[in-house]
Image (cartoon, rainbow, N blue to C red):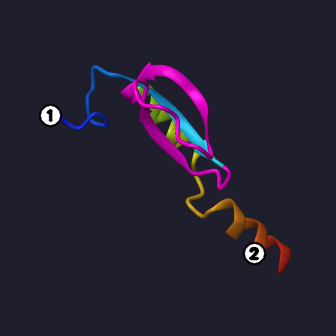
């Protein structure tokens, strides 16, 4: 069985969690608890481009907030 995250012909979602982390997610799989759909029903490359444009800070949101609170 091929990896469902690497199928260039499949349809995907981009998921985001409370830490503002992003994930490529195949549409056939249930969205895990704690994640929401930020971009739905799109091609793999469209989703990857969206992730690259939106997720520019790899630090978890809680770390960003903690670091900002100390300054």
Provide the residue designation for mark 1: 1
Could you give the CA–CA distance between mark 1 and mark 2, rounded to whole angstroms? Answer: 43 Å
Mark 1 neighbour class, 10 Å CA radius: few under 14, some 14 to 19, many 20 or more? few
Mark 1 or mark 2, earlier in chain: 1
Label 1 secondary element: loop
| Front residue of this view, candidates 56 and 32 | 32
Inspect the magenta stretch and tell me whether residue 36 lies in it. yes
Which quadrant of the figure contains the N terminus? top left
| Front residue of this view, candidates 29 and 44 | 29
Label pair 1/2, CB-CB below 8 angstroms: no
Image height of 39 relative to 55, above or below? above
Q: Quadrant of residue 3?
A: top left
The residue sitting at 60% across, 64% down in the picture is 59
Residue placed farthest to the bottom in the image? Answer: 70
The residue sitting at 43% across, 25% down in the picture is 27
Q: Residue 53 in the image: state x and y as whole percent.
A: 55, 40
Mark 2 neighbour class, 10 Å CA radius: few under 14, some 14 to 19, many 20 or more? few
Q: Residue 28 in the image: state x and y as whole percent.
A: 40, 24
Provide the residue designation for mark 2: 67
Q: Quadrant of residue 63?
A: bottom right
Report whether residue 54 is seen.
no
Q: Residue 49 in the image: state x and y as whole percent.
A: 46, 34
Q: Which mark is residue 38?
A: none
Report whether residue 60 is seen.
yes
Label 2 secondary element: helix
Q: Mark 1 or mark 2, which is nearer to you?
A: 1
Q: Which residues are magenta?
A: 18-45
Q: Quadrant of residue 4?
A: top left
């Amino acid at each position: 069985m091929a990896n469902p995250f690497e199928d260039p012909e499949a349809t995907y979602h981009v998921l985001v969690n409370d830490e503002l982390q992003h994930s490529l997610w195949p549409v056939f799989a249930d969205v895990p608890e704690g994640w929401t759909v930020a971009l739905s029903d799109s091609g793999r490359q469209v989703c990857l481009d969206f992730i690259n444009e939106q997720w520019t800070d790899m630090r978890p949101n809680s770390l960003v907030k903690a670091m900002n609170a100390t300054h």
